[in-house]
Amino acid sequence: MANVAAPKIGPVILLGPPGAGKGTQSKRIVEHYGIPQISTGDLLRDHVKRDTDLGRKAKGFLAQGKLAPDELLYGIVADRLKLPDCERGYILDGFPRTAAQAAWLDDYLGHEFFDKSETWAPVVIRMDVDYTQLLLRLTGRRTCATCGRIYNLHFQPPRVDELCDLDGSKLIQRNDDRDEVIRPRLAAYEIQTKPVAAYYQAQGRLIPLNADRPMDAVTADIFNVIDSHAAERTVSGTAKSE
Ligand code: AP5
């Protein structure tokens, strides 16, 4: 059952290159604020795994480190945002990733969201990390196949080699974390996703954040940003109802 007393957080967009820490920080936001993580990468990988029609269309793009076509994303994002657990807010991890996706999202939130009387403009946090560090993060990443916990062989290794600390499951390397796929992914970010930051910057909504620091420091900054936006929403909501 929804916690009616819990504050509304609204949409939180984590923007950043592959390996910036979007997934890692999303999991901490989920735990702290009780809002869901919507990772379009995870949704697409799930379709590929289940061999759905959409998964078959997306598979080749993911394997080559290219972005899937915009049209494949709109339906899965819209369906996910309609679920009741998104009512207090949600984290978009990996979406929008093109200027067209950003425009689609604004249009969607303007027309479809639960409570149109409130300001539901997303908080957009761009996580900036040095290129060499990104390569280390991606090549060293391992994920628990059972619980999804993320590790890194260089920075955050499991206690026992290749096994999850929480459930002992074998850690796996993502198919697109191979050197030959990492580079096209980083190139796609430069060419297709950087304009998304420009789109939000032009609206005065972009919050750049140095994510090239220890995880806890990055988390603290993200929580501060979310808290101050949630407080602003509360104030403007109160002002409106007076
Ligand atoms: P997606 O799954 O979204 O991958 P990505 O954006 O490439 O991001 P990653 O998941 O690789 O990195 P992350 O930022 O989450 O980093 P993480 O926290 O894991 O997309 C995959 C593919 O799906 C795309 O290439 C595309 O084909 C398709 N796709 C998805 N969305 C799409 C869309 N909207 N449109 C079109 N196509 C789409 O961290 C990485 C590592 O670093 C971990 O090992 C972690 O432990 C470590 N780490 C994290 N933070 C720190 C820190 N502060 N210090 C040290 N290590 C750290």
Image (spheres, grey):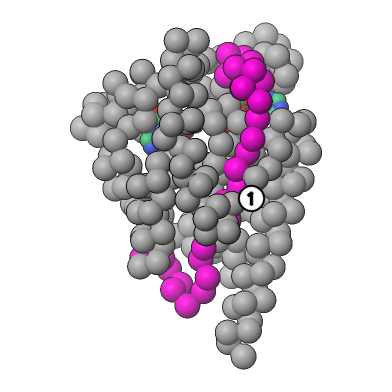
How many tags in the picture? Answer: 1
Q: Percent x, y for residue 197?
A: 52, 45
Identify the amino acid type marked 1: Ile
At x 59%, y 78%, the residue is 237
Mark 1 residue CB less than 8 A from any atom of ligand 1 = no
Q: Secondary structure at mark 1?
A: strand
- In the rendered image, is residue 217 in sight? yes
Height in image: 203 above or below 99?
A: below
Q: Percent x, y for residue 92?
A: 50, 46
Is 121 covered by the magenta stretch?
A: yes
Question: The C terminus is located in which quarter?
Answer: bottom right
Is 174 covered by the magenta stretch?
A: no
Q: Residue furthest left?
A: 53
At x 55%, y 52%, the residue is 201
Of residues 8 and 222, the one drawn nearer to the viewer in this rendering: 222
At x 76%, y 31%, the residue is 213
Q: Percent x, y for residue 125?
A: 61, 47
Horizontally, residue 217 falls left or right of residue 198, namely: right
Quadrant in the picture for residue 52: top left
Height in image: 45 above or below 179?
A: below
Q: Percent x, y for residue 50?
A: 30, 28
Of residues 210 and 175, the one drawn nearer to the viewer in this rendering: 210
At x 59%, y 52%, the residue is 206
- In the rendered image, is residue 149 in sight? no
Of residues 144 and 80, the one drawn nearer to the viewer in this rendering: 80
Height in image: 95 above or below 19?
A: below
- Residue receiving disc 1: 207
Magenta residues span: 112-141
Q: Residues within 10 Å of mark 1 (few under 14, many from 20)?
A: some
